[in-house]
Amino acid sequence: MEQTPKTIALVGNPNTGKSTVFNALTGLRQKIANYPGITVERKVGTSIIGGVLHQIIDLPGAYSLNYKKLDERIAYQALIGSYEHEEKPDLVLAVVDVTNLDRNLFLVSQLLDLEIPVILVLNMMDVAEQKQITINEQILSENLGIPVISISAKKREDIERLKQFVAKAELSPPSPLAWLDSFQLRQALGKVKKEWIQPHTNIPESAQHTEALRLISEGNFEYVFYTFEEQEKGLKVIEQAREILEQAGENPMATEVLQRYDFIDRCTKDATQQNTDTSLSITDRIDSVVTHKVFGPIIFTSILLLMFQAIFSWATPFMDFIDLIFIETGNWVANALPPGILNDLLVEGVIAGLGGVVIFLPQIVFLFFFIYILEGTGYMARAAFVMDGFMTKVGLHGRSVVPLMSGFACAIPGIMAARTIENWRDRIITIMVLPFMACSARLPVYALLIAAFIPATPVLGIFTYQGITFFGLYIFGIVMALLAAAVMKWFFPSGQQTPFIMELPAYKLPKWDVVFKNVADRGWIFVKEAGKIIVAISIVLWFLASFPGVDQQEYDQNAYEGETIESYQLRNSFAGKFGQIIEPTIEPLGFDWKIGIGLLTSFAAREVMVGTLNTIYSIEGSDEDIVTLKEKLINDTDPETGQPIYSIATALSLMVFFALAMQCMSTIAIVRRETNSWKWPTAMFVYMSALAYVCSLITFQVGSNL
Amino acid sequence: MYPLNLTKEGEEVVVKCINCHCEDVCRLNELGCIEGAKGVIISNQKNVIFKVGETRLAINSDIAKSILVSSN
């Protein structure tokens, strides 16, 4: 390879280890998992190969260049130089799963037509050895006409070998259409190119073969992304091209595919040897149980129940420890600094606000730990398969399951994962209901209120009412998402249904280093992102809740009986007065002005609610009080009536509000980006907030009258 | 020939004909399910898991009905 900087694209079928190769080459930590479609956008990094710094692009997985889904289209556009006006890559590393070579080579046969140098990277050689698959790289290279190298991307020495191989490779574009034997198909292809694509479209020359073949096999312009003119003429030319094939007894839909597979068969016939054992593998045996029509849904539900119970139970000792650290830190700072504004700001503002949220880090860590294990084993794809029938009935698609389950961690990757859904209607409904899935930002609020107001009484030996309530809130989110989808399907034209066709990956043990790295990353992101917002809001809130100060005389004259001076001061602060303005709006939901302030700040990010309450209650508490926020909520009373602020009905109403309201700026921003319109995020914000208000109102009014 | 949804678990079959919508035929073909391909039924519980080569294809019942196979 020439010693000049190049752009190298990693291309291949989904789940073949492209992101593992990308991470190994660039030193980045692009997310990897064991299900198709984990990479839905193009990622860029750099790598030094042969002493030169090259740009490496990790493209979304694609089964072919006949793009149907947004992620496949991104891959194709990047390869032909039509993605956001970028140049096409100088070299393609086609990463294939060597244990499924023929299927993977279908895409490679299409890459050979793009007039870009290609190196075939046979990945997963360690698995191939276990399955007694042997490949003669030399013969395969000669047959395909491109350089071939075998690696296992998990091995560092193999990545070094790959770098050396790329640096030394003689790169020239392979001859396009080497697979094409049929005279009629060649004639039809030439006709579409010459009579329509070249005179009427802006398709780059190197992509014209591919586009012509796609139009012949599909016969329409449904998924076309480029500009063109005279569609009617184009349709006529395509029809004539298809007639050429039909007159020769060839099926326009299938002839290209069959000829490509014939070519692949010729290329691999004398280059590969494999064990012909057709007995069922462990994956096949597990699948016969896990995807069973009765056991499958039971297993799916049980996994979710155990996961949420474990999150609640296992995290408790770690949360108590973090709580203790923040209390001790607060005490130490309070004693170390002289009394005054700085002391109050740090102890009651920053430390209280931050501690109120960081305490939930162990639960966040356990949640991501379970989600990454489900992703790493390959179970996610089975969940999609098991739930497809049910999802279709409520207006979604089986493929919606993976984005929706990703939503348990965070709505943003879930919304992006919806790119793997082919049908526009299914995709937009999935995006619109996905924020109902109980994301990790809701977890601190749920955990605080459940711990304060739901008894920890054991149920059935291994569960508790707290764990079951926690699980119930997640189920509530799922049910509301499904109901919303069922309603939305009446508002969208149904069009053609996209049937469920999905590849199920082999089960694997999770890569523990990847799981722990990803969990650590997510934990750090939670602390960093929540911390930034919370520290800022805590400082502002501390100021608003601490000023103006009150003197003893004013307190003696105006305070309610039994009201402490701290409570009186808070009630008459800037924050207190503003809270009392909005209180009539939220009073029917069972919320007082303090919760109202928390609701307002939580529109920046849901978890800010807990930090806000912690700051407000720290200011209200006397200096001698060293009690947790949970205890403060339980003991809080209305200064006017002396009645407790929080009842079980209030707690349930608040949890319902949090389950349903759209309180995440980042989600709104990502919906805007993914739908390329403000219409959808606006509609999402309005309908979710209205639904939250109504359901919360019903919950409180019914709950408090029982 | 009979549709894929009428096969039994463990049955080895050869794909003879695919009669669904053009785009679905393309998707199945890309995944290795082409006329003449040999495979085995892993699960048939309304939806079908059909193993073609090393590819486990999860296919819903409507598509399974449109894939005609014969015993291998």
Image (tube, grey):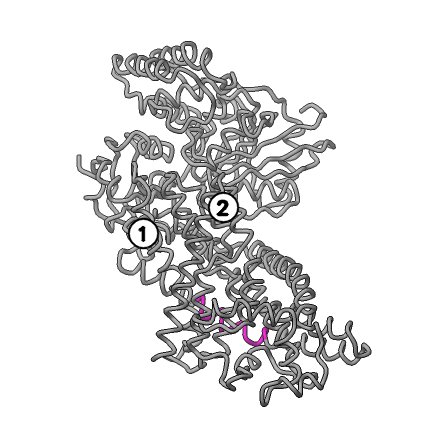
Which quadrant would the C terminus of chain A be assigned to in this image?
bottom left
Which residue is at a point 29% across and 36% down the rendered structure image?
A496
Magenta stretch bounds: A307-319
* Residue under numbered circle 1: A487
Query: Measured along the vertical axis of the image, is residue A544 above or below residue A248?
Result: below
Point out residue A129 in the picture as x, y percentages from the top left corner.
49, 43
Q: Is residue A124 visible?
A: no
- Secondary structure of the residue carrying numbered label 2: helix
Task: Give amino acid for label 1.
Answer: Val
Query: Dot 1, crowdedness within 10 Å: few (<14), some or many (≥20)?
Result: some
**Residue extending farthest left:** B1
Q: Are marks 2 and 1 in contact (CB under 8 Å)?
A: no
- Lower sequence index among marks 2 and 1: 1
The N terminus of chain A: image quadrant: top right
Chain letter, disc 2 residue: A
Amino acid type at mark 2: Val
